[in-house]
Image: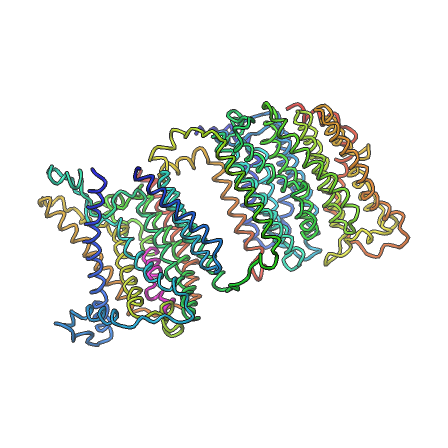
Amino acid sequence: MTLEQVLFGFFALVAVVSAVMMITGKNPVVSALFLVLNFGALSGTYVLLRAQFIAVVQIIVYAGAIMVLFLFVLMLLRPDREQSYFKDKPQMKLLAIIVGVLMLAQIAYAVLSTTTGKVAEEASRIETGTIENIGRELYTTYLLPFEAIAFVLLTATLGALVLSKKKLD
Amino acid sequence: MEPWINAGVALGKLLILANIVLINVAYLVYWERKLSAWAQSRVGPNRVGPAGLLQPFADVLKLVLKEDIVPTQAYKPIHTLAPFLALFVAFTSFAVIPIGPDITIADSAWQAIFGDSFSFAIIPSINPGILYILALTSIGVYAITMSGWSSGSKYSLLGGVRSSAQMISYEISMGFSIAGVVLLAQSLSPQAIIESQSGWMWNIFVQPIGFITFVTAAFAETNRLPFDLPEAEPELVGGYHTEYSSMKFGSFFLAEYANMTTASALIVLLYLGGWQVPYIEKLGLSETLTVIIQVAAFFLKVAALLFFFIWVRWSIPRFRYDQLMSIGWKVMFPLALINLVWVAVIAMIFN
Amino acid sequence: MDFNLSDITGYLPLVILAAVVLISLVIEMYIKSAPKILPWLTVISFLGLSYQSLLTIGKPGSFFNNMLATGGHVNIFWFLFNFGGAVVALITIDYLKKTEIYHGEYYILLQSSVLGMMLIAGAKDLIMVFVGLELMSLTFYILAGFARKRLFSNEAALKYFLLGAFATGFIVYGLALIYGSSQTLNIDKLYEHFTFESKNIVGIIGLFLFFAGFAFKIASVPFHMWVPDVYQGAPTSTTALMSTVGKAAAFSALIIVVSPAFGKEKATEILTPLVATFATLSMVYGSITAIMQTDIKRMLAYSSIVHAGYMLIGLAAGNKEGIDGVIFYLIAYSFMNLGAFGLISVLEGKEEKNLAISDYTGLGSKYPVLAGLLALFMFSLTGIPPFAAFFGKYYVFMAAIRADLLWLAIVGIAASAISLYFYLRVVVVMYFGKDESKFEVTSSNPALTGIIVSALLVILMGVLPGSIIDLIAKF
C-alpha cells in the first residue's frame, strides 16, 4: 500500500464517520462542528487529488466563513435538543428507510455497472491544481462564466439588501 | 530522498522551533508585564529569580497545579477541545514561515540527510503557503466560538460570538492585503515572497496602505487591544474564557501570545523583508556568517514588532463594538482594495 | 484566447445589458430623479436589444472559447427575453407605485434576470447553462419577495427559494454525473462519448436529474408544487416575468441540452417516455385542478402548468418540427400571459384586492376596453383559431403525430377541451354577470401600451403563423 492510499483511507474514513455523526447527532451545534471536520477531511482528499488550491479554499471559505455563520445562528437560536421529527410521524420513518434503500441500490447498481472512464492526462499532473493554472484557466477558457458569476454575486448582494434592510429608501 | 528521513528532518525542526516559540511566549508574558509596569511607572515582577526572570515558570507552575473546574452547564467534550484547538492553530501556523534563506548543500554527507538544500521552514514545500496560514487563521475562529458556546455562560457566549464576527470581518481586509503582496511577488510561497523584497524593496515601502491594513487586521485577529472586544473585562468579565481554569485557561493564554508571535512573524515575512538584510551581500562576509546575521535579523524584526504590539496595548483604549465593525468594513476594507489597485498599477508599470 | 474586436457585434447585446445593469446601479445610488429615469432606461435598452438581436439573427458565431453561441434560435430567444422584459417593465411602472413597493432595485433585478436568461439561451457549455440559470433564479427569488411587508410575498419568496435551491441541487448533481460519463461539458461534444446503452447508467441518471431540475423551473408536474403559491404571492408584475420569459429561458436550456440527445441511437426509447410522462401529467393535472380555482392568479398558475405540458409534447417528439413548434409556442404563450398578467396588475387594487375571479363580474359593461383585451387573451390561451396559441398547439401536435406519438396529441387535445371551461368562465363572468362592477380602476398608460403591443403580437402570430414558423425553422 502506498502512502497515498493510506492517507486516502484515513481521510475517507474521517469524512464518512463525521458525516454520519453529523446527521445522527442530537445537538445541532455538535452536528455543525462535525460538518466542519468533514470539510477538513474532504480538503485532505483534495490534496491527494492534486488540487491544493481547492483544498485550502475549501477550508478558508466553507469551514472559515460559512460554517461560522451557521454556528452563529445555531448558538443564538438555541434550538431544542430533543425534537425528533420521526417521533411525531413514525410512518415517515418507514418511508425514509425505503427511499434510502432505493437510493443506495440505485447508486450501487450505477457504480457496479459502469465501465470506468479514463482519467484525462492533465488531471494527474501535480501542476494542475496550482493557483497559477487555475487562474490561467479562469481568465482564458472560463472567462465568460467567471464574469457571469460576478453578476450572480452582485445580484445576490443586491437581493440581500432589498429583502432584509430595515429602512430601504 | 527517503520519505522517513524527510519526516525526521521536519520533526527535528519542529522540536527546535516549537521550543523557541514556547520559551519566547513565556518570556513574552514577562516582557509584557515589565513594559506595562514601565508604561504605568511601576516596578513589575521582580521577586522570582534575578529581576523576576523566573516569573514565567512560576506562573505556569501555578496554573498547572490549580484545580480544573468545568461548570455543570458546560458541554464537556467541546469545552475541553477548545483550548487545545487554540494552541494547535497558534503553533501550526508557524510551520511554513522560513526564518532564514534556503541553503544549498555541497557536502555529500549532509546531502544524504537534507537533500540538495536546507530550508528553515518546517514544511517548506507547501506551494500555497500563505493560503495555508489564512486557512489556519480561519480555523482559529472555532476555538474561540466553541469555548464561548460550550461554557454555558452568557458572558462566554457573547465573547465568542463577538470574536468570531470580528475575526471574519477582519479576515477580509487581511486577505486583500495579502493579495497585494502576492500580486507583487507573483507567488504564494513564503520564501518567494521574501526573496521578492530584496534590497530596500520591502513591501512596507512599496505598499504602505497594505501594511497599515494588514497590521490592523493582525491586531484584530489576535484579539489584542485596541480590538480585544471578546475579552472586554468591564462588560464580559473575561469573555470567552470566563469559565476556564487551570491549564485550560493557560492554553488560551499561551495561544494568545503564540498568535502574537506568529502574526509578527507574518508581518515581517510579508512586509519587512523577512530575513533579508539590505545589501548584506556587498559586505563580502562569509556565507555562514551571512546566514546567521539574516536569521538574527528576522528575530530582531519580530521582537521589534512584538514590542509594538505590547506598546499599543498599553497606549490605546479599547474600541466600542460598533466602532470596531464600522472600521473593519468601512475603512479597512476599502483601504485594502485601494492598495490592491495601487499594487496592480505598480506591477503593470514595472513589469 | 484570440480576442477579435469584430467579434463583439455577436455578443454585443450581453455587453450592453451588463453595462446597463451597472449604470442603473449608479443612477439608483446617486441621482435623485432615478424613479423617473430607471423604468424608461430599462424599456428603451430592452427594446434596442431586441431589435439588435433580430438584426443579427442570420450571423451565427461562437465566442469565448466556445462558451457562447449566437445567431439563429439563440437570437430568437434573445428577442423574446428582451421584448418580454420591455413589456414587463411597462407593466411594472405604475404597478409598483400603486402597491407602494417602489424601489429602484426592481428594474436592476429585472435587467439582471434577462441577462441570465440570455446567457442560458446562448450557452454552448453546461457551466454557462448553470451560471445563467443561477443568475435568473436568484433574481426571481428576490423579485418574488419584493413586496417586503406582505405576508404572501414573503411566503412566495421563501417557498420558491427553498424548492428552487433543491431543484438546482438536482441540476448540479446531474451535471456532475454527465461530466463524469462524457468527460466534457461542451454541449457539441457532449453526446460524442455518450451512449444510451445500459453501461452508461451514470450518464443517463445525470441526464434525468438535469431534466428533473428543469422540470421544476418550467413548472411541470410532478415538480409543480411551488407554482400556485408563488404565482399568487409574488407581485403581479413579477409573476408576469417568471411565468413567461422565465419559463421560456428554462425551456431554451432543455432545447439546447436535451434535444440533441434524441439524435442518438436508443435515446428515443429512454427519453421519449420520460418527457411524455411529464407532459401528460402536467396537462391532465393542471387542467383539472385549474377548474376549481377562484383566484385568477392561481388559475393562471395552473394554466401555466398545462401549457408546460403542451410544450413538453414538442420536446418529446424529438424532431426538428417539435423544437420549432416549441419555440413558436413559447413566443405565443409569453405574450398571451404577459397581456393577461398585465391586465390583472391594472385591475388589481391596493393590498391585493380584486384578484378573485368573481370580482370581475360586470367588468364588460364598465370597462369595455380592458374586458375586451382580457377576453382576447383568454380566448388565445384556450387555443381558439385566430389567435397565436392555436398554431402553437397545432405545430406541436403535428410534430408529435409525425413522431408516432398520436396518443400524446390526443391527450393534449383533451386537455385543451377541459381548459376551455376555466378560461371561458372568466369571459362569462365579465360579460354575463348580473352585478355591476364594484371597483374603480386607475388607468395606466404605460401598462396599457405594453398590453396592447402583446395583443397585437398575439393576433399577428395568429394571422401570419406561416412566416414566423418559417423564420424559426430556417435555422
From the viewer's perspective, tell me whether residue B252 is left or right of residue C174: left
**Is B105 rendered above or below residue C154?**
above
- Residue sitting at x 28%, y 67%: B247
**Is B322 rendered above or below residue C67?**
below
Q: Nearer the viewer, residue B208 or B286?
A: B286
Q: Residue B220: within the magenta?
A: yes
Residue C144 at what x, y percent from top left?
64, 51
Q: Nearer the viewer, residue C284 or B39?
A: C284
Residue C462 at what x, y percent from top left?
78, 31
Residue C130 at what x, y percent from top left?
54, 39
Q: Is residue C134 visible?
A: no
From the viewer's perspective, tell me whether residue C365 is left or right of residue C235: right
Colour mapping: rainbow
From the viewer's perspective, tell me whether residue B177 is left or right of residue C271: left
Q: Residue B100: within the magenta?
A: no
Residue A35 at what x, y percent from top left?
44, 52
Q: How many marks overall? A: 0
Q: Nearer the viewer, residue B75 or A49?
A: B75
In the image, the segment drawn in magenta is: B213-231
- Residue sitting at x 68%, y 41%: C221
**Quadrant hosting residue C389:** top right
**Is B73 rendered above or below residue C328?**
below
- Which quadrant of the figure contains the C terminus of chain C? top right
- Which quadrant of the figure contains the N terminus of chain C? top left
Q: Is residue B16 visible?
A: yes
